[in-house]
Each structure stands twice: as C-alpha cells, then as structure tokens.
Image (spheres, rainbow, N blue to C red):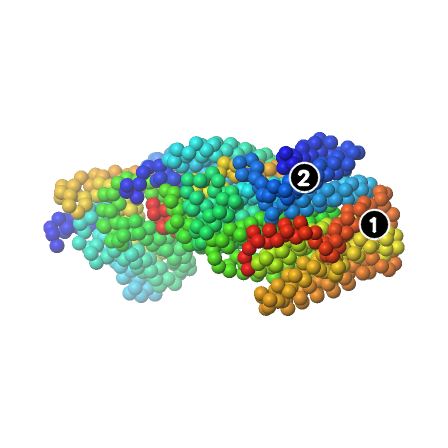
Amino acid sequence: MRPIGIITQLLELIVALAAAPLFVGWINQCRAWLQNRSAPSLWLPYRGIRKLFHKDAVIAAGASPLFRLAPYMVFAAMVVAAGIIPSMGTRLPLTQVADAIALVGLLATARVFMSLAAMDIGTAFGTLGARREMMVGFLAEPALLMVIFVASLISATTALPAITEHLATQSLGLYPSLAFTAVAFLMVLLAENARIPVDNPATHLELTMIHEALLLEYSARHLALMEWAAALKLFNYACIGFALFIPWGVSTRGSAPVTLLASLPLLVAKLAVAGAVLALIETVSAKLRVFRAPEFLATAFLFAVLGLLVHLLLGA
Amino acid sequence: MDFLLLLASPLTGAAVLALLGARRFAPELNIAFSLATFLAACALTVHVVSAGALSFAHEQFFIDPFNVFLVTLTALVGLTTAIFSRPYMRIEIEHGRVRAPQLRLYHSMYQLFMSTMLVALTTNNMGLVWVAMEGATLSTVLLVTLYRTGASLEAGWKYFVLCGVGIAQALFGTLLLYFAAEHALGAEGVRALLWTHLNGVKGQLEPKVLSLAFVFLLVGYGTKVGLAPLHNWLPDAHAEGPTPISAVLSGLLLNVALYAVVRCKILVEGSLHSALPSQMLMGFGLLSVLLAAFFLWRQRDIKRLFAYSSIEHMGIITFAFGMGGAVANFAALLHMTVHSLTKSAIFFAAGHAAQKSGSQLMDHIRGLITLSPTVGWGLMMGSLAILGVPPFGVFASEFLILTTAMREQPWATPLLLAALGVAFAAIFGRVQPMVFGETTARRLPHPPALLPVFVHLGLVLALGLYIPPYLADWYRAAARLIGGG
Amino acid sequence: MAGVSLDLQLLNLCAALLLLLSFAMLSQRRIVNLVNLLALQGAVLFVATLLIAWRTHQAHLYLSAGLTLGLKVLLLPYLLHRLIRRLQVYWDAEPLLNISGTMLIGVLIVVFSFGLAQPISALASTATRNAIGIAVAVVLLSFLTMIIRRKAMSQVVGFLSMENGLFFGAMSATYGMPMVVEFGVALDVLVAVLVLGIFFFQIREQFDSLDLHHLESLREDAAARRAE
C-alpha cells in the first residue's frame, strides 16, 4: 500500500464527510433562490447536526437494540461507500476489496437497516415509510445495476476506479448508450434520495412522505447520524454520477500526486453545478403520486436497459 | 406498343372515369377501357407466342411464360366484370345503396385496381411488385367501404390494417432480397431487384438471408392470398363490398398475390437447395384448405360462403406449388385459371341473386330458378364447377393435384380429400335450396348481364374437356420455370 | 468508440434516438404528441439519410433524404394534425396493456430483433450494419403499438412508423433501395394516408367515434349471431 493511496483515501473520506452537509445546504440555497425565497444559510445543515448531537436521546419504550444500532450501521455503510467512489483520485486501496456491485450492496444494506429500524417501533408511519422505501428500492436497484453494467461493459471491468480511468482517458466520442444511462441514473438519484418527483425532502408530516417517515422516531445523536448519512448518500450518488459520466479531472494512476490537489476545486465545481441542476429539476417538476413512482422508476429502468441494448447493438 | 397500351389503357381509364365516372355512359366507358386492355393483352399474347419472352423499359417490365397467361386472364376477367357491373351498379343506384359520387369513385378505382394488377404481373422489379400490391390494397379499400354501412367500414378497416401490416412484412422481405442480391451482384446494384437478374444468380444468393426473406415475403404476400391464419380480412371484404369487387378480389387479386409468392419461391429455392420453401407453402396451403372447409359450414351469407371457398382453393393451389414438379405446377396453374374464371362467375350470379332477394343471407334467397332461370342455373352450374364436378376444368386440375399428392405426399391426401368432401357437402347443401323451391325473388329494374357468367363457365367447361396445345405448352413452360419437386 | 469517425458516431446516435422514439411512441397516449413523435422520427431519419449520402457520395440518397423531409417530416404530420383537428380526437383510450407491461415486451422485442438481425449484420458490408437490428426493432415496436392501441388514429401512426423503420433498415443494410422503388413506396404511403383520411370521416359519420371497438362485429361468432 503506497502512501499516495492512503493519502487519497483519507482525503476523500474527509472531503466526503465534510462536504456532504454542505452540498445539501447548497441545494437548499439554490432552491430558495429559484423559488424567490430568502435563502437559508449554507451552513444550516451543520448547525442542525451539531445541535442534535448536544441533545439527549429519547428512545421509544418498545425499541430493540436494532433500533439503536441502525443509525451507526447506516452511517458506516455510507462512509465506506464514500471510500470506494473515486471522487478525487482513482488510487483507492479500499476499492480492491469492493467493486461497483458491492457499492450497490452497501447502499442496499443501509436501506435494509433503516427500514427494519422504522418497523421496529411499530408505529403506523414507520411501517408505511418502510414499505414505500422498500418498493422504491426494489425498483431503483436494478436500474442502478443496469447503469453500472453499461459502464462496466464499455470499460470491461466492474471496479469503479478502473471504469473511471477508462472513461476519462479514451478519446472523446458520442456514446448514445451512456447518454441513455445518464438519464436513467439521474432518475434513480432523484428517487433514491427522496427528491421531488418521488418524495419531498421539505416536508415532515405528509401522508405521502417516504424518507421522513423512516426517521420520525429518531432524536438527538441518532437523528443527527441519520441526517448526515442521508446527506452522504446524496453526495455519494453525485460522485457516482461524476465517476461514470463526467470523469475528467480525477487524479488517475500514473499521474503526479499533485493532481490530487487540483481535483479538489474541480470536484467542488462539479458539485456546485450538480446541486444547481438538481434544485432546478426539483423546482420545475411536480411531485408524483406515490402510486406513480413505480412508473417513474420503470422508465428509469427502461432507459438503462435501452442504454445496454444500444451498447450491445451498436457497440457505442 | 401493345404492352404500352396494356398499362396505359387502365391508367387513362382511371383518370377519365375520375372525371366522368358518374355520367350515364360511365359503365359503357368502363367496359370500353377494359375492352381496350383486353385487346392489348391478346395482342401481347400473340406477340409473345411468336417472339418468345420480352422485356420493356430497360428490363423493368417483362413477359415470360409464367405471367403471360395471367395477364390475359386478368384482362379477360376485368372485361367481363366490367360488363357484369354495368347493370349491377345501375340496380344498386335504383335501390338507393349507391349515389353518383360513389359511382365515380367506383369506376375510377376499378380501372386503377386493374392497372395495379397488370403492373404487379408484368414488372420485373421485385420492389415494383410490392408497390403495385400495396396500390391494389389502397385502390380497393375504398371500394369495400362503398356502401358506407357499419359492417362495410369495419371490413374495409380490417382489410387495410391486415393487408397493410402484411405488406409491410413483404417490404422487409424485399429489402432482404435486395440485400442478398447486392451481395451477389456487386456493382450491379441498380438492377439488383430485377427478377431475371436475380434468377440468373440465384445459386449465389446467401441462403441464410434468403430463407429469412422468404418467411417475410410469404407472410406478407400470403396475407393477400388469404392464406390461413392471415385470412381474416378476406371473407369480410368479399361480403361487404359490392359484388363486382368481390369477383375481382377473388378472381384476380388472390391470383396475383400468389404469383408474387411463387416468383419469390423460385428464387429462394434456387438459393437454398432445401425443401424449406416447399414445406412452408404446403403447410400454409393445407392449413388454409382445412380451416376454410371448417368455416364453410358456419356461413349464412352467400358471399362469405364463396369467400371461404376462395381461401380453400388458394390453399389447394399453394399446396400444389409447394409440391412442385412439372405435373403439380401444371395443375396449379390450370387451377389458378379455372378457379379465377369460375369464382368470378359465381360471384356474378350470387350478386344478382342477392339483388333479387334483397338480402345476402342464404336463408332469404329461395327458388331463384322460378323467377330467373338463368341466374339460378348460373349459380348452380358455377357451384358444381367450383366443387370439382366433372367435366368442368376444376375437376381436371384437382384430379391432377390429388394424384400427384398421392404419389409425392401421401400423408396429405386424406386431409385434402376430407376437406374437399366437407366443402362439397357444405356448398351444395346451401346452394340447392337457393336455386330450387319456393321463390322469394323480385323483379329487377335492369336486366342482369349473365353473358359473363356463361362465358366463364363455358371456358371452364372447355378447359375441362380439352386444353388447346398452345395453352398446354405455356403451362408446361411455366411449370418448368417454377421447377421444384 | 475510439477511432470511429464522427459521422458514423452521429449515425449511431440517430439509430439510438430512433429506438428511443419508438419507445416513447409506445407509451404516449396523447395523439397529438404521437404525431409529433412521428415527425421527429422522420426528422432523425432525414438526418441519418443525409449523413449516409454524405458518407457514400451517392447522389440519389440526397434525393431520398429530400423525399423524407418533404413527406415524413412536413406533409404527413401536417395532414395528420389537420385530421386530428377536424375529427377532434386528442386522446387515445386506455391501451390494452399497462405501460410497464408494454415496456417489458418492448425490451424483449429489441432483444429478439437483435437476434434476428445478427446474421444479416454479419454479412453486410455497410458501415451502418450495426443499426439493422435497431431498424428491425423499430418495425416490431411499431407493430406492437398498432396491437395495443384502440384508436384508429394511433394505429395509423404505428403503421407509418413501421414504414419509417423499414426505410431505416434499407438505409443501414444497403444504403437505400433503388430509386424507383423508393418513389413508389413514398407514393403508396402518401396515398395510404389520404385514403385513410377519407376513411376516418366515413367511420366517424357512421359511429360518431374513432374508437375501434365499434369495429368488432364481423367476427365469425358475431356474424352468425347477427344472422339469427
């Protein structure tokens, strides 16, 4: 294990942990601007998390140890996931044990723990949210896998850093298959992170909510971890998107270690643009009825499959 | 010259009748154009008999032993149907089922249909065959809906959609054919769809592509032949359109579509050296025969009854072409001729019978012979002829087909015989009470034209008794060309 | 994709777009949008034809590109839009199959077409041979559109899109058919739309609707019932 690998790995984890709430804050700010509201502070998510860490936790009477365990598991899964996505450099020691499919598995693990914990208490909202979360997940996961398969087919590997390197270093060209999968990925991202066409991150008490229903019973440090994990998840998804569809500027194998430093501002720029685009999408689209969510995700899956087929047919 | 007239006459007719088709003399004009076409066809035949195969317009059109007799047959049936339709359409006007603008449409489209048939028969270009076949659908679809009743609109829609989709498959087949041809002919791209050229290099055409092409072509043109299970449009279109159209659909369109299928089969067989095309033709043919025989029992509408009979006979012919070989091909060609003549004659008689009774339902048609012996006898003789009673020509061709089947494909013979028996019982059982018994018929405002019925039946009878040597020579030459077996 | 020239990349993009448009047609229920999608399909076809013409320096392909532009992008959609306005049919009824099911069948159809086109693509010498499978898929998907739709209008759009698919197939397999045939096909398609226009007015006059469930009485059992 060479020092540059360890440095990259640590740097990425630190950036992910630090930038995730900031990214959420940035999206909220953009949304507020687009909706002509006065924008909340960029640092609001941090303040929220700090405040929650200082509070005393209240736990429902019938809660099992699983309920207490879940926030740590979810948070840990997200942190590990952040460690294997090449957001800044591809020299990541962790990725030798976990490829893109393991990444999907990590995300699924987090989902399972969240849903189990929500059902553990036995409230109506929690169970409802868990069921919806599982429905969304069971439709979004195959779509995400398809997206990853297309990228893997193009670069002939399932290791994320290798995919990124392959895509970043080949000559520029039109890839209809990647265009289709990018659309699919965007749709999965919106659904998985409880963004607007599927869920609304701004509401707490609505019958149609999904993500917030899962967190209703949590308080204090548990809630803080859950929210941090949610921010990390969004950050991770954004980085997967960068790794697959705009991989340029990442410090690759064989390049000078200094490029690692140059990749940080580039990542920030990418995140800024992605956040603005996300806010725009959320502003212009209306929330779907929960029962239409499967159709939305089926379309995402269709796009991913079309990308796959187009790649197989045209070799492009 | 004669060839030019052959195609120009119906086209000019279509244009002229589009303007004058509603006048009093329009039916006579229609006959005149058809007559010109027929005379041109006769002249062309004489020409070909003396000079051998011909080609025109940079080989885009050609006449060979296979299509020359079909051209003459088409022109003849076109003429006789025009003669028949003169009083028929006038009666329809008196009965208020058709008005002047529709009559104009009818006359114009009739001539257009004839020209598409003749183009499909004479063109050497497999792409133009497709264009003409699609043109034939389009020119007849509005004729099927001429009466504007709910049922006729439905029949027209079904006809359009099924044949449209079918013909799209045929276009794909043609495309594959072109693909294979370009592969084999190389730089000769422009001529790559000319049948004579394809026939010359058929041994080098890629078998894999051609077998795929044949499936699509057979399904595509087979829809128009009315082969089961793609026959659904056929009974409806025959029953709901005006009778002259039923007559030309049965007598001409089905033949021409089958002609296209056989042309394709010749190419594919030459490339594949396997029995696949033959087996497919035999399979579709046999299925059509059996299915039609089954459905014949259930018919109550006289035109539907004979439409199913057309499916049955097309099945027999397809089966015969599938068997291949000199005798079966000869018989199939003969059967094409006599079926076309007989079936149009039957539709003429049935059309007048329906007009006399004011209904197409067979239960309402009774005792034709009392009021109008000629219509009654025409229907009776026609039915006997189509059922294969000797000495009519249908007997001769069916006998040849059956004996060949016994020798070549013994397994199919009992099925064929059973189907023919069922058809005999079904049709004869229905026709007998219509012709004899208490009458329900009424007088018609115009005397029906029964000359065509008896001309056709006379020809069929003559062909059953004696095939003139030059005609037999044609059949043999065409049978050799088709080959197989 | 490295080393592939830009025009070929663009052609591949056109092929992919055609496939996407076919799926969009499959799921679209507003007839006006359906016609717009058809026009878009024609436009993609036009671009593809132009690219092939430019690539192969075949003059007659420019002609057929012009034909595509005039007929499939401008004239036919215009005629169809006029028909829609005059007939006041804007929405198709609920299709016979739900969207997800249709999409699933659609994906299977694409896989099937891929298999079907494999032997042809293997033999083809054109640079665009990979797109043959997509052309077959477009044809079959249009066929599916025709099967699951109830309104006559949507079926016609399906029919025209099938013809587009065949045209694209001809382009990608052999750089187009001989000009005589292409003209003939274009003429037939135009006449078909005109005939159908007349036909629709007749249907509506008779049934006050363009819903095809009115046209279901002529089945064998139904015919027997009517007769009784």
Can residue B87 be seen at all in this image of the molecule?
Answer: yes
* Residue A296 locus on image (x, y percent): 43, 49
* Residue A75 locus on image (x, y percent): 26, 55
Q: Secondary structure at mark 1?
A: helix
Judged left or right of residue B17, residue C119 is left
Q: Which mark is residue B43?
A: 2
Q: Amino acid at mark 1?
A: Lys
Q: Chain of mark 1?
A: B
Q: Chain of mark 2?
A: B
The one of B183 and C141 positioned closer to us in this rendering: B183
Whether B213 is drawn above or below B437: the answer is above
Residue located 48% across and 40% down the image: B191
Question: To which quarter of the image does residue B464 belong?
Answer: bottom right
Q: Quadrant location of the N terminus of chain B?
A: top right
Q: Quadrant location of the C terminus of chain B?
A: bottom right
Q: Nearer the viewer, mark 1 or mark 2?
A: 2
* Residue A102 locus on image (x, y percent): 27, 57
Residue located 47% across and 45% down the image: B178
Q: Which mark is residue B356?
A: 1
* Residue B52 locus on image (x, y percent): 60, 43
Mark 1 vs mark 2: tell me if same chain.
yes
